[in-house]
Amino acid sequence: MLVVMLMLLMITATAYYSIRSTAFELRAATYQRQALQTDYVAETALNAATAWVDFYGPASLLFALQESVRLRQAGGVGMVTPPEPFEVPLLPGRESYRLGQGDFVGMTATTEEPIELAAFGDDHAYQPFYVIDVYDHYVSPVVQGGRADGLGQLQFLNVTLTARGRTRLPVDTQQSVNFDSDGDGADDTVVRFAHEGASDARAHGFSGPFAR
């Protein structure tokens, strides 16, 4: 009788261990899938930003960067200063511009965004969210084959583009996380979604030539 009880106990423990291992593997596979989907969102948003510059031209982006300082100084209602809330705020007077999901509608014959929702499965459990911050720009007045003194009429635009890709549930709770977000040695309270996936992609853009 004792031997039978020990065998039943051993079989039950083995079954319980197998069930827990399967649950952990399924959860890990789900998290890995979300991580891959979030990487796809960030990389696709970065490629879409470069296509935006090609579509509208570097002169339009340069104008938007220059106008961003004036609009912030004018106290635009609800304006967000890139790269907040994802990075340390820029110094006062530094030019920056943020591309959102609605900025890419109309660039093609369709009204769809550059993100393929089919990559998220049939149920679309996680919804993509992304913004692209443009900053740290400078203009190169010397172009290949142009005047070496920089007095020519053509120039190149150099910018840093950072795509912030996120995957979020349509209905999700928010939680406060305390950490030093600005490097001043004191913890800051940052609000984020409880089941959010995050991935950033960064590139250096070099566009032109275009006329002054």
Image: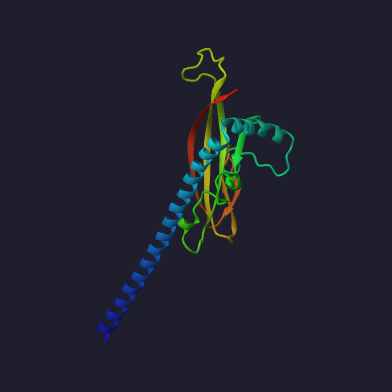
Q: Nearer the viewer, residue 74 or 86?
A: 74
Residue 199's spot in the image, x, y percent?
Answer: 48, 47
Q: Please state if 149 lies on the left or on the right of 5 as rendered.
A: right
Res 184 quadrant in image: top right
Which quarter of the image is occupied by the C terminus?
top right
Furthest residue to the top?
149
| 148 vs 8: above or below | above
Residue shown at the point (59%, 30%) measured from the top left: 59
Residue shown at the point (59%, 55%) measured from the top left: 175
Furthest residue to the front?
109
**Residue 84 in sight:** yes
Residue shown at the point (52%, 33%) measured from the top left: 160
Residue 77's spot in the image, x, y percent?
Answer: 73, 43
Which quarter of the image is occupied by the N terminus?
bottom left
Residue 73's spot in the image, x, y percent?
Answer: 72, 33
Q: Nearer the viewer, residue 58 or 205?
A: 58
**Residue 89 in sight:** no
Furthest residue to the left?
3
Residue shown at the point (36%, 67%) measured from the top left: 22
Q: Nearer the viewer, residue 178 or 31?
A: 31
Total number of numbered discs in the rendering: 0
Residue 85's spot in the image, x, y percent?
Answer: 60, 44
| 71 vs 173: above or below | above
Q: Please state if 144 lies on the left or on the right of 194 as rendered.
A: left
